[in-house]
Amino acid sequence: MIYIEYNADGMVSTQHFMPFDKFNGIKNADGNISTEAELNAKGLLVESIPQMKIEEGKNGALYINISTKELFYKFTDVPKTEVEILRDQIALMNARVNQKEIDDQTFQDYTLSKLPQ
């Protein structure tokens, strides 16, 4: 059995894979290993946890559907690092400089074409 605790949104905050182990198990206030009833009062005992599928650029968090007790993962985008943000800004600035150079050259070509020959 695996013991989990979760918040009101269903996000799993605790996973204990040996809740009844005599050395590493979850102890109650008396210092004894907690009973199944004591653990179910605070969380839930489950048989297994689904394996998370790794998705590039995503962080996964384990959730439980509180009404059905089904476990699942929610994925969120990994925030960009400072280096990635700076690279994006440099690329944007380079694109703008290149566009400005094209616009300047186009203006010069246009102006030169209007001069009397």
Image (cartoon, grey):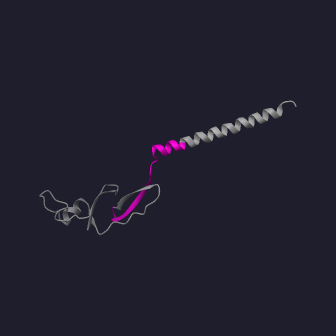
Q: In front: 28, or 87?
A: 87
Furthest residue in direction bottom, as rendered: 47
Residue drawn where x is 39% and y is 61% of the image: 73
Residue 1 pos. (x, y %): 26, 68
Residue 109 pos. (x, y %): 78, 36
Residue drawn where x is 42% and y is 63% of the image: 53
In magenta segment, residue 75: yes
Asked which quadrant contains residue 28, the reply is bottom left
Furthest residue in direction right, as rendered: 117
Q: How many marks?
A: 0
Answer with left or right where residue 86 lies relative to residue 107: left
In magenta segment, residue 107: no
Quarter the C terminus occupies: top right
Answer with left or right where residue 33 lies relative to residue 64: left
Q: Is residue 70 above or below residue 90?
A: below
Residue 2 pos. (x, y %): 27, 65
The region drawn magenta spans 66-88
Q: In front: 23, or 76?
A: 23
Asked which quadrant contains residue 65, the reply is bottom left
Answer with left or right where residue 110 lies relative to residue 6: right
Q: Is residue 75 above or below residue 20?
A: above
Furthest residue in direction top, as rendered: 116
Residue drawn where x is 66% and y is 40% of the image: 99
Residue 93 pos. (x, y %): 58, 39
Q: Is residue 20 above or below residue 57?
A: below
